[in-house]
Amino acid sequence: MQSNHDGKKPGLPEIVEILAVSVCFTYISGGEAVGAVGLLIAYATLRWGRS
């Protein structure tokens, strides 16, 4: 399933997904923002590649 992945900045669906994932990661990491940010960066890198 390929979305509009042509190197553009993430659109609204991607932003919503990032917010939802970041909330989940913050919860998983026990509220530690640093851990959540690290997990989110790793997730975004895997999901969309390096920008």
Image: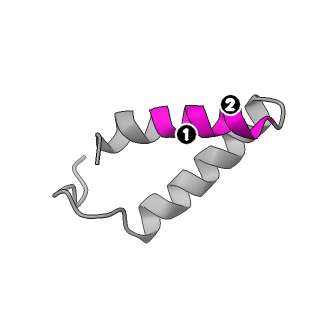
Q: Which mark is residue 3?
A: none
Residue type pointed to by label 2:
Gly
Image coords of residue 37 (percent x, y): 61, 40
Residue at image x 43%, y 42%? 44
Span highlighted in magenta in the image: 32-42
Residue type pointed to by label 1:
Leu
Image coords of residue 8 (percent x, y): 23, 63
Give the overall secondary structure of the magenta segment: helix
Most foreground residue, 36 or 19: 36
Image coords of residue 48 (percent x, y): 32, 44
Q: Earlier in the sequence, mark 2 or mark 1?
A: 2
Q: Which mark is residue 40?
A: 1
Image coords of residue 19 (percent x, y): 60, 56
Is residue 49 left or right of 20 when viewed as pictured?
left
Is residue 24 left or right of 42 when viewed as pictured?
right
Furthest residue in direction bottom, as rendered: 12
Question: Is residue 39 located in the magenta-colored stretch of the structure?
Answer: yes
Is residue 35 left or right of 45 when viewed as pictured?
right
Identify the residue position indicated by label 2 in the image: 35
Residue at image x 37%, y 37%? 45
Residue at image x 70%, y 48%? 23
Callout 1 crowding tier (Cα within 10 Å): few <14, some 14–19, many ≥20: many
Question: Is residue 1 located in the magenta-colored stretch of the structure?
Answer: no
